[in-house]
Image (cartoon, rainbow, N blue to C red):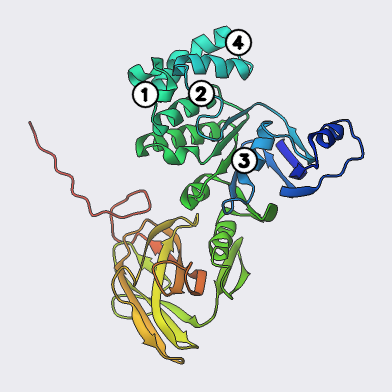
Amino acid sequence: MTVLGVSNLGKSYRQYASEFNRFGRWFNLPVKPTAEYWVLQNVTFDVRRGESLGIVGKNGAGKSTLLKMITGVLQPTEGSIHVNGKIAAILELGMGFSPDLTARANVLQSLGLMGYGHDEITGILSEIEAFAEIGEYFDEPMRTYSSGMQVRVAFSVATAFRPDILIVDEALSVGDAYFQHKSFDRIREFKNQGTSLLIVSHDAGSIQAICDKVILLQDGGLLMEGAPETVIDYYNASLAEHQNQTLRQIDCGEQKVQTISGTGEATIEKVELLDEDGQLIEVAAVGHKVTLAVHVKTHFDIEKLVLGFSIKNHLGQAIFGTNTYHTKQIQYDVKSGTELLFNVQLPANFGEGSYSLQLALVSTDTHLVNNYEWRDLAYVFKIANLAKDYFIGMSWLDSIIEIKSK
């Protein structure tokens, strides 16, 4: 069942020659604006019950505007929004709270405006106070709160009752690590119970961990919609689009899409996985030493060349990565036509499963300066547990358990 349907949604801000003309527009008089700026246009998507949607894009792409229209804070200029259920949202920090009121008073006021009755609110108030964990500050004016304390109260209010749709816009990023973990546990619990989620975040790991699909907004429009890893990879590659680079995606089958971008001044020619004896393998044993052999060729003279790599799990989450900028192994003044072999040696201390290798040829510690080639899904390999005791998780840790009688 669809709980949220957005169709051809658009929002523009208009300027008029006078306030009289603006007033006339309210009564549908034929008054034309002197200028019109579209923040968002032609956005269409839907969210089903229990589905999680991630929204990504550069600053100014229209993410917050979209969420404000969905929650009714802003009215769209064109298009329609159909909501089937109750929405709870955490948008801008402190939105809807009075700084002169205590958290307790703000909770009563906010939940009342959300349509809950007095008995419902008083019955849940102690649970909200306990979840926020701000102690005696719960009865102090909110103007005395830090941003993290405001987030604690806002999230506690928004999730006091399980909504049909929960919207979170970057607010949790200012909270402390403990409360972030606590909040995402509640978000996952709601999702398992059937709540649909809309999450805006610059944290790709959070998006890929919790979302079923992702949309990419760019220049006020919907550029892409698809699987989290595919959209996030494309978004990361597009961040360097100011360079004279190409960006393409290749369907690898099994719902995997490889993203390749860059200027082509250096390219990845071949990637191999080798065992301790230097033999080619496709499956590595947990804990065994392996070598990732990356063959690179330059096609132009390059002042500085850096290899970066990241190992990602089957969900596209990075579990380890570094580059030769941080390891102080930058290659200087590399001539055109040079062939280099980068051997990355590491223990395969990973859990059983499928993993992929993300590679980047750049000039510094980021691809935003010079992106010669960025390649996702550059190599896919498997890890099997052939000799270790049973364990769970993404990492093998050689742990020792001591038991002593007291």
Q: CA distance from mark 3 to mark 1?
A: 29 Å
Tag 1 or tag 3, which sits nearer the N-term? 3
Is residue 278 something one can see in this rendering?
Answer: yes
Dot 2 and dot 3 residues touching (CB under 8 Å): no
Q: Give the quarter of the figure containing the C terminus.
A: top left
SS for dot 2: helix
Q: CA distance from mark 4 to mark 2?
A: 14 Å
Please name the amino acid that badge 1 sits on: Glu
Q: CA distance from mark 1 to mark 2?
A: 13 Å
- Mark 1, Cα crowd under 10 Å, few <14 / some 14-19 / many 20+, is some
Q: Give the quarter of the figure containing the N terminus.
A: top right
- Mark 2, Cα crowd under 10 Å, few <14 / some 14-19 / many 20+, is many
- The residue pinned by badge 2 equals 157
Please name the amino acid that badge 4 sits on: Gly
Tag 2 or tag 1, which sits nearer the N-term? 1
Please name the amino acid that badge 3 sits on: Glu
SS for dot 3: loop
Vertical placement of 235 versus 52: above or below? below
Nearer-the-camera pick, 177 or 255? 177
Please name the amino acid that badge 2 sits on: Val
Place of residue 67 in the rendered image (x, y in percent of width and height, measured from the top left): 64, 39
Q: Residue at 51% across / 41% down in the picture?
A: 170
- The residue pinned by badge 3 equals 51
Vertical placement of 350 versus 108: above or below? below
- The residue pinned by badge 1 equals 133
Q: Which mark is residue 117?
A: 4
SS for dot 4: loop
- Mark 3, Cα crowd under 10 Å, few <14 / some 14-19 / many 20+, is many
Tag 1 or tag 4, which sits nearer the N-term? 4
Q: Residue furthest top?
A: 119
Place of residue 131 in the rendered image (x, y in percent of width and height, measured from the top left): 41, 23
